[in-house]
Amino acid sequence: MEATEQEDHIADAGQFVAPPNGGVNELLDMGEDNMQGQMEEFLGPQAQYNEEEEERKYYRRKRLGVIKNVVAASLGAMMVYSVYMGLLQMQLILHYDMTYREVKYSNLGLEDIDRKMLMGINVTPIIGLLYTPVLIRFFGTKWIMFLASGIYALFVSTNYWERYYTLVPSAVAIGVAIVPLWASLGNYITRMAQQYYEYANYKEEHVQEQKKLPKGACHSYIIIFQSVFYLIFNLSLVFAELPMRLVLNSHLHENKYILANVKVCGAEIRGMIPGFNTTVLTNLPHSMLLIKVESVLMGFALLAMIIFLVLCGPAYRPTEEIDLRSIGWGNIFQLPFKHLRDYRLRLLCPFFIYSGLEVLFAITGFSLSYGVCILGLKKLWLLIVVYGLSSSVFSSLSLFLLRLPRWLCLLGGAAVHAVLIIALLAFSSKPDQPEYLGPLLVISVLWGLGTALNKTGVSILLGMLYAEEKERLDFIYTIYHWWQAIAIFIVYLWSGLPMRAKLSILLATLLLSCYCYCVMERRMAKKVQHRLPRIPRPRHKVKGYRYLEEDNSDESDSEKSVEEENDENIEEMPSADGEEEEQDAGTEGADSPRVWRRGARGQQHRWEDGHLQGAEEEEKQVVE
Amino acid sequence: MAFLPRELLALMAVLGVVQLICGYSYRNCIEDQWSNRKSFHCTRRYVGKMSNMTQDLPVTAVNLSISHCNVSQLDNSLSHLQNLQHLSISLCNLKIISGNAFRSLSQLKSLILSFNELSELKPLLFEDLQSLNSLLLAHNKLQALPEEIFLNTSSLQTLNMDTNVLNNFANVVRSVSHLMNLTALDLSFNHFTSLSHSSASLPRSLTKLSLKGNNLLTLGCQATLFNYVKLLDLSNNARLTAMAFKGVDLSHLKFLSLKLTKVDILTFLNISNVSRVHVDFSGTGLKNKTQIEKLCELLRKKHSIMKSLKLDDNGIKSTSFTLHYCPTITKALHLSQNKLQTVKCLDFLDGQEKITEFYAEHNRLLSLSSCKNRSKPALTKLKKLSYRYNRILSVKANAFHLTPNIKVLQLNINNIAFLDHHALKGLKQLQELRLDNNLLTDLFKDTFANTCKLKILNLRNNRVSVIFNGTFYCLKKLTTLDLGGNKITHFQAAGFDGLTKLSKLYLDGNNLKTIKTSFYYAFQDTLKVLDLSRNKIRFLTKDKSSPFMNFSKLTDLKVASQRPYGLTLLPPTLFRGLHSLKSLYLGNNRITHIPCDAFDDLTGLHFLTLDNCCVGGVNLHPGVFKNLRNLTKLILENVGLQNFTKEVFGNLTQLRILQANHNTMQSIPLDALESLVKLQYLDIRNVSLSCTCKNSFLQNYTLHNPDLQVVYLYNLQCPEDNSKTFFNFNTEVCFIDLGEHLFFCTAAVIFLFTVTPLLHVKLYWKVKYGYFVFRAWFSEQWSRIRDKEENCKYDAFISYNSVDEEWVMDYLVPNLEGNKSPFKLCLHHRDFELGRDIVDNIVNAVYSSRKTICVVSRSFLCSEWCSLEIQLASYRLFDEHRDVLLLVFLEPISERQLSSYHRMRKVMLKKTYLQWPGPDTTNFLQARELFWSQLRRAIRAGNRLETEDEAQEHYAAQDHQTEENQTSDESCYLQP
């Protein structure tokens, strides 16, 4: 900080002292003493410059910036999802209506398009694991969020003009974007917690040296940030119901008509709602009205894009980003798979799947087969709003993890859900029973509670497990959300199954995931070693501006060979507290001026450190 | 007051509906074609309320006919049709007519309310109908008329109330008594038992009174009742006897019918003062000879001439009577509906030579025998003879010998199988001959040999199978020949010879298989109507020639319904040459394919019907109707039309009526409809127009077009859902265009908005770098283009000291200017202008040359002129940024030596230069080659400030140079 500022001052002074004009120069030379006095005077206030104070203010601004990033990312994601889900729900209901389809499109092709669209959204994410890390590292975390929001906006745009060749490609694009979006969101929030820790503890040696953070140092920030994120994000379900509530509800038929052929609701039915009337609209909404609704949604989608673009700062410093993508695209491609060797992740997989299953079950299975079937389509919005509100509000419950053990959150949510699933297994009723509104709302609220605990729990847990490893976060979150995508796909597949089967699958998954989670916690408590793939040293191209000085083709060649050896044969086996996990983290730059000043000088010996460490590891390997 | 709001509401609803419908189509009525919003008929619309039918009719309606509908009550739903003149509401089960039903219909002239269930009429019902002329109330259940009902209808002329249950004649008379214009009153088939009418009397103007079919036993009227009546019909009053007429004044009657009464006609004639010759004696039981002759005597007593004698329906069995004693009949004798078996050459007409018409229809005549042998005076005045509806089997030769001057002979609807060769002999005046519906099998050559004045010959529904040569040879004046319904399979070659004036030929329902042009040559220039429908014509190949080629005046052509397979194939040439054709009937023909040039010659066609013409869905090619620019009516009923496109129908600019019902097109493109600019009447009933956005514009068009009537538009159902109707299916969801535009706009915006920041972040420097690279390249190209444009006189001006002239002349000029290279040099001794100032010359040389080559040697440096030249050239460099200076060192000059020439050194420091390889240079020949090529290139190069790579080249050249020089003189190494 001081360095740069001083330099600046000198430069300023220099300008004063030696302007390019020769004549003036002479003049100044003559009255140099006088000038010197003036200079002192001019610089006088600067003399009282309190470096500590300024630094403190600087980091406070930085911390506020981090909080702004978290809030902006949450708001952006919330908007994108409100728009997306609101539009999707509205369009699916409209397209479900036979009259609407016939009048507007004069054939039944639209239903087919919708099916294809859902398939595009649900099936494409399965291959997400292949490209997500590559994509994230190519564009950067923030840019992926921006890009994904662009794709969602494009989906809104295509709904202006519903054709096979507009809807299906945009649905596929959404399918492609889902896993990267969520992986980067998770990554971003966790990374923000790390940054916050760094800015809060800027004086610490390990922060200034850009070493790895101490174990558990930023856990509390992770908890808070993830809670805030889900607190805001879950509101998307509330806003997503606005189009339904404000526009569509007035066009819907009465329950008697819609549910005329429905025999039974709840646990006993098979499929979504067998016998549901194929026309649900009393009168078709004016297309101008739909265009207006879509335009409003479009506006919000654009707003979300702008939020991501303008308000979300970058998650990594540019130098870090370069390092992240300089480990070789092949490695980036492989690493998510290699991370699955970590037993902690493996044992969490059921939970990942469950967290996908339960959300989708809540907004499709439960709200349709129980909610709509019993209360009618006009009450759908209420159920989902209540669900969204409760999951949003109860997301704050996970703040208790600051005091309580972390298993409480996940297992608490699981317990709530287990009870609810068992209750739902037993619950079935006749259609069109408005008196069940109360109980269903309660179930909705409780399910929201469970969802909140589950979602925040899993995210927080992942963040805590990998809190210190900022270069692994994207792999971890990719895996998490890929499993969720698989779960979504399962829900998409099971839509024809009997409700009891669905619930049983849910329950089984839940129990399995609880068991696995407990196993994991026990192993961790026993400090069982987990395998973490080694992340190779960044291989920068010779042209990279930062490495010109120490560029030595021979050296890099040798390194490369060593690295490759490492990559192929050696896996890091850090102890539970992970002290030796330090590797090539040295290359990070920092925004801190002090670090900047150290810049080039520090770089070299850090590299050497790295070399040394590599050698040590090799030695260790040999010893072992 | 409670009902008022409801009434208002109803009114507003009606108004709303009317407001809503501003198009030309009507809910339950059809405007008659061509009627220009004047005539409407509403039939078979079972909508319950009259207002539903009439509410959307325009005020211009003049004729309105409502029939076959189930409306029990007529309220004021006609009140808005103030121009109505003819109104008919029949067969509607009408029971009640409210008092104000016809209010404001002051223009109404005729009102028909027959065949309803009316049992009473409101007293002021016809109050406003001042101009009513005729009123028909037949076949209702009226029992009485209110007395004041006709109070204001003073212009009523005809009143028909037959088949009601009226029983009080006085009541009727009272209500009509003041109608001063009433001429006809029909009260037949009511329940009157007497005609007592108290004080009131029939209006004087009444001339026709029909009271048939009542239960009159006596008349019971005042003697003067029939004082002004001219025509009185009392038939079918089965109980009426002659005595009833006693004392009734019938002297003014011009016609009296007493058919089927108990009146003994002879008694009656004696009792009554009726003018005897004006009595209709039909159905009065005058059976036998004595009765008829007695009648004649009675008639003869008072009259010597009578116009016509009607003896229909009297059961007369034989013609043994003579009418000799009767008054002279000047016009007609009616003997129809008797039981005559023979007319015996009209023997009984002895003494009645003035008779002109004789009718013996509906008798039992079996044959018409020959009359040639009779020596009777001929009935020369007889003009019309009718034997219709008899059982005549044979007509013998000379059967009409005694009636040589008849013009009209009606022998139709008999059993004539034998028509003698000479049966019609002598009928030279015959103009119309009807022989239809008989059993004729052959037409002989001499059958019509004498009837040369025949104009109309009807032979329909006989069994003629062949037309022999010369059958019609004599009929030069025949205009109409009806041969329909026979079994004609072919004509002999000269079968139609002689028919030179024929204009209408009906050949429908025969067994013709082909159309041969040669048979029709006799009348091909006069024929106007040709009916060939229901034959067995069939085309299986595409004939090349047209059978109708020469029918230049043919206006109507019917080839519809060929049996049993239809036309099958429509040859493209079939209708060639029919330029004057106005109507063409092609329906029911199972045509598989309509060629696109089939109708090309029918430029005058007004009417074309293709109903049921085709097998399956007809595929109308674009342009098939391209020449039918005069077509006004087109019937395309049930042709399986699937696409209604502009390409097919676009040329029918005169089309007014289009019937396209029972087709399968799902939509009608609006542009196709709009291209039919004169279309007024469009029938698309039972077309499965889909209620989808594709047709949203069509819906709007049909609803709001003020010039196009779509028949029963409001009953058109959606094929998807029969409970929905086409005219009001929801089009609000159809704004597809706007959505499309929005999609493209927003998608582009989003794409740009996504990609631009990404590109900015990812590729900013690359783009910037690329931009500068491009700019450099471009400016270079640009300068090159500029240089090419530059027009210099010389390529190079050589500046040298005359000491070096030898080198210049020996080496430089041959190398640069000779055949080898294209350069043009400027040498001072050669090219300087004579007499000009030397400085001018130098300036001129420098500025008109692209380059200035300074041949530097020690002597050059000493020369002032050379110094001037180099300065001028370098000025150009500094002033214009044009690098024109090229330095060639002839000998190595050390820097030290140069330093004295301050300016020269400055130039040297900036410029690269060439060194002439001296003879001491190793391998100097090669070096010199290189020198020259360098120099040439330098001259050729553009003279903008050098770009980098050029400089590079110079470096290279210089390096080369220096390398060479290094050996000779180290000190000459001049670094630029």
Image (tube, coloured by chain):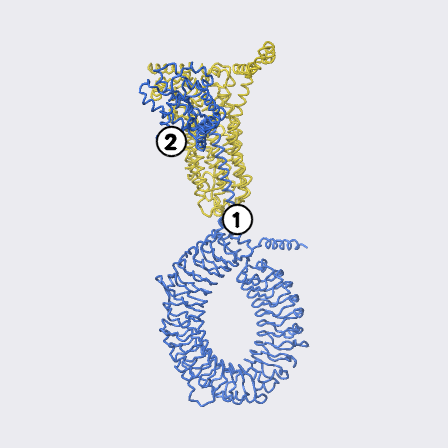
Q: Residue B72: x percent and y percent?
A: 58, 62
Please give left or right for residue A228 compared with residue B462 in the image.
Answer: right
Mark 1, residue position: B730
Which label's residue is closer to the chain start, 2 or 1? 1
- Relative to residue A559, is residue A74 depicted above or below? below
**Callout 2: residue from which chain?**
B
Q: Amino acid at mark 2?
A: Pro
Q: Is residue B525 among the parts visible in the rendering?
A: yes
Give the crowd class for mark 2: few <14, some 14-19, many >=20 residues within 10 Å.
few
Q: Residue furthest left?
A: B923
Where is residue A592? Give x, y as percent: 50, 17
Image mark for residue B683: none
Closer to the eye: label 2 or 1 = 2
Between the residue at mark 2 and the residue at mark 1, the CA separation in whole angstroms equals 84 Å
Q: Is residue B845 above or below residue B231?
A: above
The amino acid beneath tag 1 is: Asn
Chain letter of mark 1 equals B
Q: Is residue B504 left or right of A53 when viewed as pictured?
A: left
Q: Quadrant of the N terminus of chain B?
A: bottom right
Identify the secondary structure beneath mark 2.
loop
> Which residue sits at x=53%, y=24%?
A67
Q: Position of residue B47 (x, y in %)?
A: 55, 59
Q: Secondary structure at mark 1?
A: loop
Chain B colour as displayed: blue
Nearer to me, A238 or A403: A238
Q: Nearer the viewer, residue A451 or A579?
A: A579
Asked if B40 appears above or below B189 in the picture, the reply is: above
Q: Output the letter for the chain in yellow.
A: A
Give the tally of numbered discs. Answer: 2
Q: Which residue is mark 2?
A: B822
- Report whether residue A465 is seen: no
Q: Position of residue B222 (x, y in %)?
A: 66, 80
